[in-house]
Image (spheres, coloured by chain):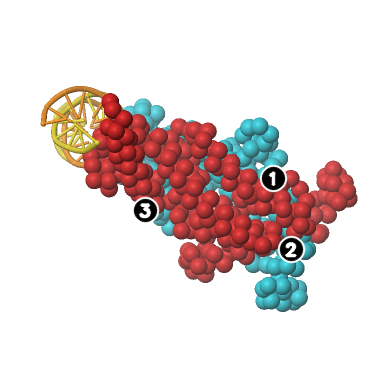
Chain colours: A cyan, B red, C yellow, D orange
Amino acid sequence: MNSEGDWFTLFTMSEQRERILAEACDLFLRDGTDGFSMRKLARAVGVTAPALYKYYESKERLLHEVMAQGYERFAQYLYRGLMGGTPLKRLELASQGYLDFALENPRLYEFIYGAPEAAGMTDLPEDVEALGCAIGQFWHDRVRECMDAGLLRVGDPERVSVTMWAHAHGLLILFWRGRLMEGSGVMSEEQFRVFFQESGMRLLEGVGTPAVLDAIRIRSPERASEAAAV
Amino acid sequence: MNSEGDWFTLFTMSEQRERILAEACDLFLRDGTDGFSMRKLARAVGVTAPALYKYYESKERLLHEVMAQGYERFAQYLYRGLMGGTPLKRLELASQGYLDFALENPRLYEFIYGAPEAAGMTDLPEDVEALGCAIGQFWHDRVRECMDAGLLRVGDPERVSVTMWAHAHGLLILFWRGRLMEGSGVMSEEQFRVFFQESGMRLLEGVGTPAVLDAIRIRSPERASEAAAV
DNA sequence: GTCTATAATCCGATAGAC
DNA sequence: GTCTATCGGATTATAGAC
């Protein structure tokens, strides 16, 4: 119970915790949700499974920390974008960071944004959810400043950023599921990067013509008046 | 070995196969990928697990047929759209069918468009993949005829339809993962339907302003010349 | 055709010896 | 702190009796 003993214990304790967590993250980066088990992790760390429970009381608690690490890694990619000198540059760099993180850490990305149940978790603790909210806020900020700069159409930044997020997220998932074709076969990663950019441009400029917007607005007068107000 | 005996055998054989398949589809509609096991299916059918293997040589083969059924059901929703009298009406009705199918059969939708490995399948046989291609072709047709009618910007119909698909797919996945908020909490299904429509409008008219398109095109001359050609 | 019984693996988690 | 041993559960799949 002397302080020196406690310190030493705490030190080695956290040292092992860190090793286990680092190994768990590696395991996720390699094999993803399906390939993860406490037994495999124990093998990777070099101990037996029961030993892990000395450091993490359950698999779920451990996964929460892995997810927190994943968010931190994700944020590092995104925050590079803040070095851009203009709102547009910041948005572009952040988008680049988003794509880079996803393509370089696909299993981790899918873990973070996949269904918690798929990894055997019931739900997320609020401190982990807060990390997700922070990233959402980051995007709202990027979108809002582009609206203020006259680069994006005026609207609710939160709703507009969800539109952009859904587009990017959907492309990534379809790509990983092998649903995107080019020429005779499945798209390569290089082709996907080009397509991602191209598709993003379509979202910016719109896929419709003025004719279709008129045709739709005629049927929904409230939208027409909104347009007139702008 | 007489023909009558064989007929009878074949008849009851396929009858049981159909019962098993129907029950498997129901099980998927209710519980989805995670809740599916041969034991549960056997219980639902009213037999024991080993009996199933008389009709389907493996779980994977059975899942292939469930997926084929899912595609067929999906197609029924989509093809309603063909009753529309104009290209725009057909596109709108098909989109409505897409959303209806997804929201009414979420587990089935996620099974069809999820990772095959998530359900314990290695990959898809070509006859099942062909069903997916047919649906892709249906969308290309809808997009192409809208381009011809001057309702959508001219472009490669396949690539444009992927942009639209990714947007819709991404929204659905984020909604099901509980990532879409409105007000204080998670979006309700009704709120999501409104948002889906609203977000689709944004994709039609574009989220960017002319200013941002100019800013980007100045840096990529080949795009500027494309625009000039139109 | 259907059953019981069983094989061979995996999993998460715990108890208790050292 | 780590181990062995084990519990209790899941899974796919097969063998052989009826």
Residue A16 seen: no
Find the distance from the CA under tag 2 to the CA under tag 1. 19 Å
- Which residue is labeled 2 in the image? A212
Report which quarter residue B78 is drawn in: bottom right
Amino acid, disc 3:
Arg
Amino acid, disc 1:
Arg
Residue B84 in the image: above or below residue C13 = below
Are the numbered discs 2 and 3 placed on the same chain, yes or no? no
Asked if the residues shown at circle 2 and circle 3 are in contact, with their CB atoms under 8 angstroms apart, the answer is: no
Left or right, residue A31 beside residue A190: left
- Which residue is labeled 1 in the image? B159
Left or right, residue B53 beside residue A178: left
Q: Position of residue A168 (x, y in %)?
A: 62, 49
Left or right, residue B227 beside residue A221: right
Q: Chain of mark 1?
A: B
Look at the numbered disc 3 and give the secondary structure of its residue.
helix
Find the distance from the CA under tag 3 to the CA under tag 1. 34 Å
Q: Compare marks 3 and 1 and give the one earlier in the sequence.
A: 3
- Which residue is labeled 3 in the image? B30
> What is the crowding at mark 2: few (fewer than 14 residues within 10 Å), some, or many (at least 20)?
many
Task: State the quadrant of the N terminus of chain B.
Answer: top left
Q: Chain of mark 2?
A: A
Left or right, residue B66 beside residue A96: left
Look at the numbered disc 1 and give the secondary structure of its residue.
helix
Amino acid, disc 2:
Val
Q: Position of residue A19 (x, y in %)?
A: 42, 34
Residue B147 in the image: above or below residue A102 = below
Q: Residue at (68%, 40%) from the top-left corner?
A: A193
Find the distance from the CA under tag 2 to the CA under tag 3. 39 Å
> What is the crowding at mark 1: few (fewer than 14 residues within 10 Å), some, or many (at least 20)?
some
Residue C2 in the image: above or below residue B99 = above
Residue B19 seen: yes
